[in-house]
Image: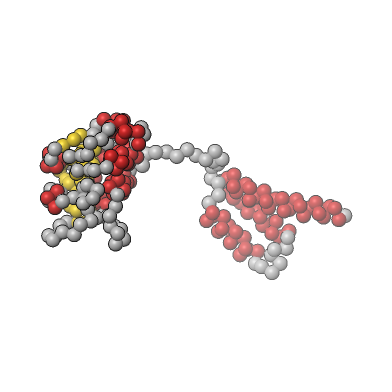
Amino acid sequence: MSALDAVAIVLHRPQDPVNLAATVRVMKNMGLSDLRLVEPMPYDPWRIEGVAHGTRDLVEGIRHFETLPAALADCVYVAAFGAKRRAHRWPTTSPRALAPVALEKAREGKVALLFGQEDHGLPNDAIDLAQVLVAIPTTEHASLNLAQAVLIAAYELHLGAGDATRTVARHKHHAPLPRHDEWERALGDIDRALAAIAFYRTRNAEHILRSVRSLLNRAGPDSRELTLVRAMAIEVLRTIDRVKRGLE
């Protein structure tokens, strides 16, 4: 079970099937599964799944409602998303600040994130049914695509719930972190290589080596990468040795 199981996305009078499909994809990506539509436009579920691949379970679970109060009837907390100015003072927040509050409320019952139709957003009587108005920070151009707004809200909830569960495969050349003795061997060979090319002639060797150590620490190489750096230093020493033997 996830805290996100108690969160519903409610679309009030959505007008564009493309936005519906994009919303379904967002919900699948972010771990949400309860989609409620109030007076939606006609749409073909097969076409929705054709745009949002691999979402049949979510598409089949979409619920339709004739009124917004019916869609929100079982919800203990409703957050309405919109950028409209209201004549009356209204509790407002941002998606990031909403996430921990919504997840806490979800412990007690269903939480709804309410979004309006594409051209006019939510009417005042719809916002009246919410406990808080959520404004997504933007520039002066505050109009967002419906699915984009859902993505921002769902992303913040997803992170807040700790549901970032997708694992990324390790790089094929993944190597463990270098051990302390590997660090010291590499730095020793770097020190000898710098000395061999007379790099310390006008410089403080201790300070230079400390700077090299600091640089490598900030770079954070794995053992394979540190071995490569060490190999460069060793090759410098070998090249100098071959040149010396050639001159003898």
Q: Residue furthest front?
A: 42
Is 32 in front, or is 13?
13
Is 67 in front, or is 114?
67
Give percent across and percent down for residue 93.
22, 55
Name the image quarter holding the C terminus.
Answer: bottom right
Q: Residue at x 23, y 50 (%)?
A: 119
Rendered image quadrant of residue 40:
top left
In this picture, residue 91 sits left or right of residue 215: left
Q: Residue at x 13, y 38 (%)?
A: 66
Q: Residue furthest right?
A: 248
**Is residue 110 in view?**
no
Give percent across and percent down for residue 143.
27, 55
Rendered image quadrant of residue 187:
bottom right
Give percent across and percent down for residue 22.
32, 41
**Is residue 148 in view?**
yes
In this picture, residue 234 sits left or right of residue 75: right
In this picture, residue 233 sits left or right of residue 175: right
Q: Residue at x 54, y 54 (%)?
A: 219
